[in-house]
Each structure stands twice: as structure tokens, then as C-alpha cells.
Amino acid sequence: MEYLEKYNLWLEKVNDKKLKDELVSMTDEQKSTAFFKDIEFGTAGLRGTVGAGSNCMNIYTVGRATRAVCEYMKKIGGKSIAVSYDNRIMSYDFARLVAGICVKYGIKVYLADKMMPTPYLSYMVRYYGADMGVMITASHNPREYNGYKVYGNDGCQLLDEPSLEIMKIADTLDLFDLSFEDVDESVKTRKIVLTDNVILESYKTEVKKQSRNKIENIKVVFSALNGTGINTLPVILEECGAEIVYNEVQCKADENFTTCPSPNPEKLEVFETSLPIARNCGADLIILSDPDADRVGLEVLHNGEYVHLSGNEAGVLMVDYLLKTRNVSNGVICKSIVSTGLADKIAESKGARCKNVLTGFKYIGEFIKKLENDGREGEFVLGFEESYGYLVGTHVRDKDATVASLVITEMASEYKKQGFTLVDRLEALYGEFGYYEHIVYSYKFAGSEGADKMKNILSGLRANAPTSFGGIKVEEVVDYANGVDDLPKANVLIYNLEGGSQVVVRPSGTEPLIKTYITLSKTKEENAKNLELIKAGIAEIVG
């Protein structure tokens, strides 16, 4: 169906006044963007802008996804589901819609009593023994986005096969058939059970088990980036001995993210309101959790200045520290294929190994499940992605800013007792294993024309593989679309360049972006020179 046909169908069928008004006021370009495709599952479930349209997050697309989940649960014999939500536009309403539809299907619902982090939803699934879970969140995406993550009974995001099955079911359902039970009445009849302080304390206890050394004499400036982290992260750090100074303006829920329009800890600008607070109080660390508190950003006081650590840098510090403080035989680090190879070197030096998986934390969760099935769950030390996502322990099966922040703060405390900082330790690791730099560049392709351009760029890379980037020779091309090792096929291309540099190209699973990951492993001067050459080479390809 062409986008104008879809638009006219929505104009006829939609009853919600706000969405109807939005439809009436749309320009031709807005119609094309909102209707050129149906919203679909990416690396982290549904993700799209909030508003009218088949490619957007609204009561109709959320309702159909939920009915598809319920139909899937009927097929597998599922009886109960856990549901939670973050602070974004419509999150509370979407979560209640999900709960009401599930009750209509005869499914028992465990519903978060307030906005809570994504990893807490993973814990809810495992704590209640639920058959599935749904988290309403767009994680670190810009404020106009919301999303819908689906979890299995192990607390891990659904893998590709069941996700595709749910999508196929959704394609058979009438988008405008919205039928649901009243949430408040369902709470009274216990068809919906609201979470309470008992499960929250249970989660906190499990997180605190990951601490091995007492946190002392460490001051942390904390920002929740107007999201859910305020309900777990600083409380646990304080209970474990850290002194917390709150960035008050960003520790209040704000669906418009007034002080951080793009609430992503990968972006330096989100630290701007925390830096003056840190300088004023002499904080050792600045810790930010993204809105659904599954990612953590970090800056460290070093020689009187605050130094930003990348996701890879924080990851290798955790690899090094955890392997020193955990008595684990056959320890294993599980990380994404786009995360730093320095972690592999550090792990190998300590008698451990790295397992590399596709991008998406669900693949790390899948690996933990395999270890568990083999009776080797105790070998798991850390899961991480360069995009600031980490998991220590197996009490949840998703990245968790709270447990990561606990380990980071403990690390900083231990090193401070010895007279050095996290930056000092990082530089020592570079001295031992070689200097690594990692840079990520994203290129946006909005709307239907953008989607076509993305597709053409990626197919062009396969049809006419580049022989160099900015004059630096390509020595090897690894195409994950053909299947590599034992990993599922994926739309990822890796170019290993002469001299040890690397370029990875993949489409984002949550936004209309082509993401490029550059690894440089020479001196700072050589890296700077090679980066400019590689950037120019990438620019020629993506335009």
C-alpha cells in the first residue's frame, strides 16, 4: 500500500482526537515520513517518533504490537507478563494500554508502580517468573522518540526468530482494533499486580552483591538526565559508601529533556550542567545514566580537570579491575563485535577470554543463557558494548547503569586509596598493551528517500568493495551478512586496514542512521593523521 493510501485509511479510521488533528495538519513530506513503512522490530524492539502514522509510536501501533505479543504468548502457553516504562512522552499511557490489552487476553500483569529503569524490567520478569516482559522506552534516543522492548522469560530481550514471528502475527491483525480492560479496576481484582518496595529491595540486594571492596572517600556528581536512574542508582551508591551530589535539575523527570535535548551519555554536551557542580564540590566522578538507566556516562577528576572516558575506555577499565578482583576460573568477557579489541588483549593476559557477539545486548544475554544451560554461569564476568552499556552479574539479562556505576565507583575508590585515578590506570594499560582510540560517526538518512539511500550505500559497499579509505589500503573485508563464526547473519561490514586501523559500517537498529566505527592503534600523532584520511574516505562513500 502506498503511503497516501495508508494516510487516507488512518484519516478514516482514527478516533483519537489528538492523532486525528495531527493527521489533518500534516504536510506531504510529513505524510511520507510517517507512512512510507510500518514500524518494525530493530536491534532493540520498536523505536520511532511519537505521533500519528504507521511508522510512529502511537496507541494503534503499540496496541497492535501488544496484541501480537499476546497471540504469541497464547501459542507458547504464556500466562503472565511484566510491564514497565520510563519518563518519555506517552510512556505511562502506553504501559497502561499494554497492561489493559494483556488483561483482556486473560494474561496476568505485573506492572511497575512508577517509572523504572529498563534493567529493572528484566529483573521483574525473573523475580515474578513471568513468561514475557514489555518495557516502554526509547533509551538514549532524542526526546521525540519512544519505543517498545519485548523480553522472554529469562529476562533477556527477544532474539531475532521470536521477534520475527511476533511481527508476522502483527501483520495479520487489524491495526485499529483497540480493546482493553480498565487498569484501575484490574488492579482491584488482582489481574494486575503493582510492584512494591519488596521487589525493589530484592533488586538492590542483588546489585550490591557485585561489590567486592568498601567504597570510601569518593564524591560523585550524579545526573539521571531527567529519567529513571534516580529511583535506583544514587540510592545504591550512597548505601555502599559513596557521597552523592545531585544535579537537581536533571534528577527530575522531564519528558521534554529541557536541559539535554538528546539525552545520550555518549555526547559531551550532556555533561555541561554537571561540570560546574563537580568543580564547585571537588567531585571525584561525574556519573550520568541515560533516561532508562541502562547506559552510563563517566567523567573523572584527573590532575585538576575532568576527563571524559569513552564507553570502550570504561569497559577496558572494568575488564582489568574485575578480572583482578574476581576469583573466576575460565572467566569470560562478552562484548559486541564493534567494541575494542584491547579488551581481548587484557582478558588474555589474565587467563580469561573474550566472546564477541553481534551488536545488541540481547546477544550478550543469549550468551549468558548458554553458559547457564551448560552449568557455567559462574564464568561470566562482564558484558559490555562500546555504546556505554555494561552488565556485571547475571541477576538481570540486560545492560544496567546501576551495577556498572557501582563497580566504577568502587574501582575509583580502590585506586584513590593507592594514590592514582582511573585515568592513570587507563594510561598504564595503554603503556602495557598499546594505545587505542575509537571514534564513532553517525550519518542520518530521514524519511523514505533516506531509507532508500541507506540501502543503496550498503548494497554498493558489497557490490564495489572499497580498496582503501583515504588512501589507507584495505587488507581484509569481513561481511557478517555471509555469517561469521557461529554468529547470526547481520548487516555489518568490517574493513581491516593496513597498519592496524579498522572501519566498521552498520545501519543503526533504532534510528535512521548509518554508523561507522573507527579504531586507531598507533601513536596519538599517527592516529590523528590517519583519522582525517579515514574520515575523508568514509565521506566519499556516504556522501
Image: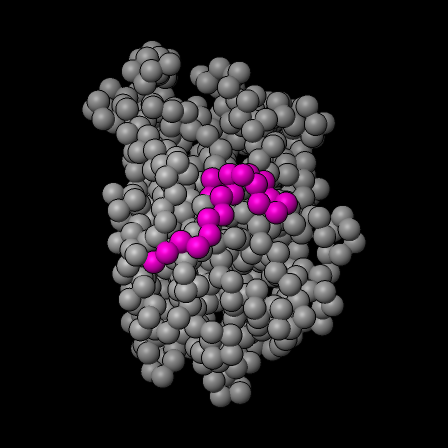
Image quarter hosting the N terminus: top left
Left or right of 275, for residue 206: right
Q: For this rendering, which residue is in front, 58 or 481?
A: 481
What x and y, as percent, mark residue 441? 33, 53
Q: Which residues are magenta?
A: 472-492
Can see residue 403? yes
Q: Nearer the viewer, residue 517 or 365?
A: 517
Q: Position of residue 45 (x, y in %)?
A: 50, 37
Question: Is the residue 224 above or below the residue 38 in the image?
Answer: below
Q: Nearer the viewer, residue 28 or 290?
A: 28
State yes or no: residue 489 in magenta: yes
Q: Is residue 514 magenta?
A: no
Residue 352: percent from left, percent from top? 66, 67
Q: Let me know if residue 212 appears in the view.
A: no
In percent of width and height, residue 336 lies at 53, 53
Q: Which image quarter: residue 528?
A: bottom left
Q: Image point 43% across, 52% down: which residue?
A: 495
> Quick check: 453 left or right of 418?
left
Q: Taking 373 as reference, is 302 above or below it?
A: below
Which residue sits at x=61%, y=68%?
A: 347
